[in-house]
Amino acid sequence: MATQTVAVLLSGLKNVFETLLIFCNTMTSLLSRRCFLGTTAAAVTSVGLLAENRFSSAQTAAAQTVTATPFPSQIYKARIIDTPTDTICEQWKAAGFAGMEVSNWNVSPAVARQTRQLVEKYDLRIHSVMRGWTNFNDPAKYEADIESVKTALRTASAYGADTVLLVPCRIGGMKMPEAWDFDIDFDPKTLKVKTVAEGDNSVYADYIAAQNLATESSIRAVESLIPVAAYEGVRIAIENVWNNLWCTPKFFAAFCQYFNHPWVGCYFDLGNHTKYARCEEWIKELGNSIVKLHIKGFKVKEVKGKLGGGPGDWAKIDQASIDWKSVRKLLSDVRYNGWMSIEENGYSDAEYSKILDKIIAGE
């Protein structure tokens, strides 16, 4: 009976929210986009926080599979898969994982709910959905990609996930600095880039223009998606994946924090940006913007950048040139409390589980 009452309450709140959105849409001609987001943030957040209650049972189950640590924060181990199966769930549960991230974002709510039931049968949880690359800086693809992210948010809600991983844009094909030579000067209010490296930046004019276009279109896209994210109770977690954008810790943090909204954060990959700067520098700047973590290995062959970046190549997590003890302490310092999903292969599930146990324990 209590469950039915909660369901009715949530349904009623969603109806109220839909009415609020219709009203706000009529006001957008009078209000700026940022004002619109500000005036609806409180109502949006309250509905979303109630929606998060749907995840409590799965979180409780996941909490039963944890690594003992000396830190006050808790990190849950996960793997990434397209579509979960009974066999995969059995294997990952036996290896000590608490959940998974799913890349199959374009399924019906009914299929997603069935998948959620399958996963939770093993006391596991789908914690995130990987929407991945979009092309918000391409006018011909903008609207379709916006709709696809809305679909991913709805699918994530049906899966019982609380996050959608989003890579807003990618650029390339023009002259740009080496990864370890970036020294970006940008306007903290507009995020428009002035220069990207020391010295003469005329050779980077095309890159700077492409960067600014991508930033502007990504801001517009994410802001338009916030009401849907809040309605579904699913956060938009922005990831940077060698897409030649926001290439310094300070700039990427400024982009993620620009929205200043509870439904937008950062999906940070531990190791993915080691060629640009040391992992610790990224964590210090991103701070509590980090809502989810990927982990993989990268080995820097020669340190060149001011912040420790340099040329290198992928390596297994336990062979990476990353000080995992320092990283774990910093994650605790910024009060990160959540999921860490492995994004590499090469070891068995049991071996990866043990490697993550050591990292999470700060060993």
Image: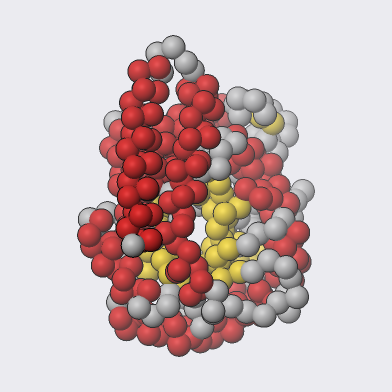
Q: Is residue 26 above or below residue 271?
A: above
Asked whether residue 114 is in view, the answer is: yes
Position of the C terminus by quadrant: bottom right
Q: In x, y percent, where is residue 320? A: 64, 71
Question: Which residue is at the front of the view, 16 or 212?
Answer: 16
Drawn side of residue 8 relative to residue 94, left or right: left
Q: In x, y percent, where is residue 216? A: 49, 28
Q: Is residue 241 above or below residue 18?
A: below
Residue at the image point whose x is 55% and y is 65% from the top: 339
- Rendering quarter of residue 332: bottom right
Asked whether residue 314 is in view, the answer is: no
Drawn side of residue 295 relative to residue 148, left or right: right
Residue at the image point whose x is 25% and y is 56% from the top: 109
Residue at the image point whose x is 52% and y is 33% from the top: 41
Drawn side of residue 280 relative to residue 163, left or right: right
Q: Is residue 117 above or below residue 40?
A: below
Q: In x, y percent, where is residue 137? A: 41, 33
- Rendering quarter of residue 354: bottom right
- Rendering quarter of residue 108: bottom left
Colour approach in the figure = secondary structure
Q: In x, y percent, where is residue 324? A: 70, 70
Residue that lies at the very extreme toward the front in this rendered image: 1
